[in-house]
Image: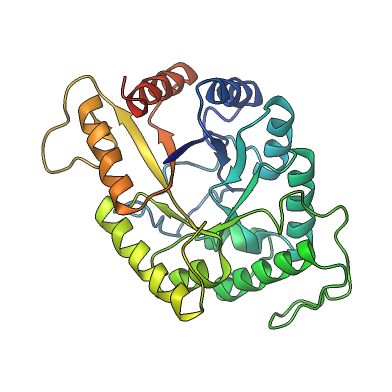
Amino acid sequence: MQYGVILPNVGPMARIDVLTQIACQVEKLGYRGIFLSDHVALPIDLRSAYPYRSDGRFPLSADDLILEPITTLSYLAAVTDSVHLGFSVLVLPYRHPVLNAKMMATLDVISSGRLIVGAGVGWMAEEFAALDAEFADRGVVTDDHIRVMRALWVGDNPSIEGTNSDAAGVVISPPPVQKPHPPIWTGGISAPALRRAANLGDGWHGVRQSPDDVVRVVSGISQLRSRSDLTMEGYEISLRAGLDITDAPFGGDGRTPLRGSPDQISADLLDYANAGLTYLVLEPRAESPEQFLEQLERFAKISKGE
């Protein structure tokens, strides 16, 4: 299993000196990738329910810091050498598909082929409205964007069929370094999301799923890909998950995976590996850069069996 880290480009630690410090230390510790979240402008009066918490409350407010992820990842490409540079996830409908294709190609070129395009449909209706982006049909729009990006990345005179885009006949130059193109990971566990991941993605990227959940996802995607004569060879099963390493074991029924003592974390990693997870992207619970790095240093030792 490979390990990556979510950098805090949204929230109180979203400062470029902090992200640079963490990114460089992540590389030194042997992690495989760094990933950023995608938000542009948070509403003062947020009504949309956050899908990754049971109470629907988004943990950030309108006055929290946000470093736009594509710009920030471009900067981090220049201060790192080998780690993957990814999004968890880029909300494709926020931007035009040709612009998405061009920015991602450029990022892959300037990073010498280190880009992973985590792609999502988004959930915050207010942010869609602020960006004049289509919310109601965002799933269809996201599928269109993926098809357009693929076509522009690999074709000299691409024909973009089955989409609502009029981008046929334009060229992206220089093309991405990675061939045929940077990997695209899509997430979600709904039926449409799994179809998107199976048929349009090079990998699946979930959020806070248990090992049992991962087993079901792997089975579902494998079945869908087989119907299209696609195999699982080279297909990435990735997960974004919170990390909270404690000195004492975490007791009770409320424990979530990757929260607890080193022994508990080690057991969780084995469960995830057996479930078919190939790339785990960690989001440490921390209130300061020091706590953030301490969690990563402890996890690095656990993952190596130390």
Q: Is residue 63 left or right of residue 243?
A: right
Task: Choose between 16 and 83: the one closer to the eye.
Answer: 83
The N terminus - image quarter: top left
Q: Is residue 210 visible?
A: no
Task: Choose between 177 and 217: the one closer to the eye.
Answer: 177
The quarter holding residue 287 reads top left
Image vertical order of residue 283 relative to residue 189, above or below: above
Q: Is residue 211 left or right of residue 295?
A: left
> What is the image's colouring?
rainbow
Task: Choose between 233 and 206: the one closer to the eye.
Answer: 233
Residue 114 rendering spot, x and y as whole percentages: 67, 41
Residue 3 rendering spot, x and y as whole percentages: 46, 37
The C terminus - image quarter: top left
Residue, far bottom: 162
Q: Is residue 227 left or right of residue 81?
A: left
User: At 68% across and 83% down in the image, what residue appears?
Assistant: 162
The quarter holding residue 92 reads bottom right
Residue 258 rendering spot, x and y as whole percentages: 29, 37
Image vertical order of residue 144 relative to residue 81, above or below: below
Q: Is residue 166 left or right of residue 297?
A: right
- The number of discs equals 0
Q: Is residue 130 visible?
A: yes
Image vertical order of residue 23 relative to residue 59, above or below: above
Task: Choose between 60 and 150: the one closer to the eye.
Answer: 150
Residue 257 rendering spot, x and y as whole percentages: 26, 41
User: At 44% across and 69% down in the image, what residue appears?
Assistant: 194
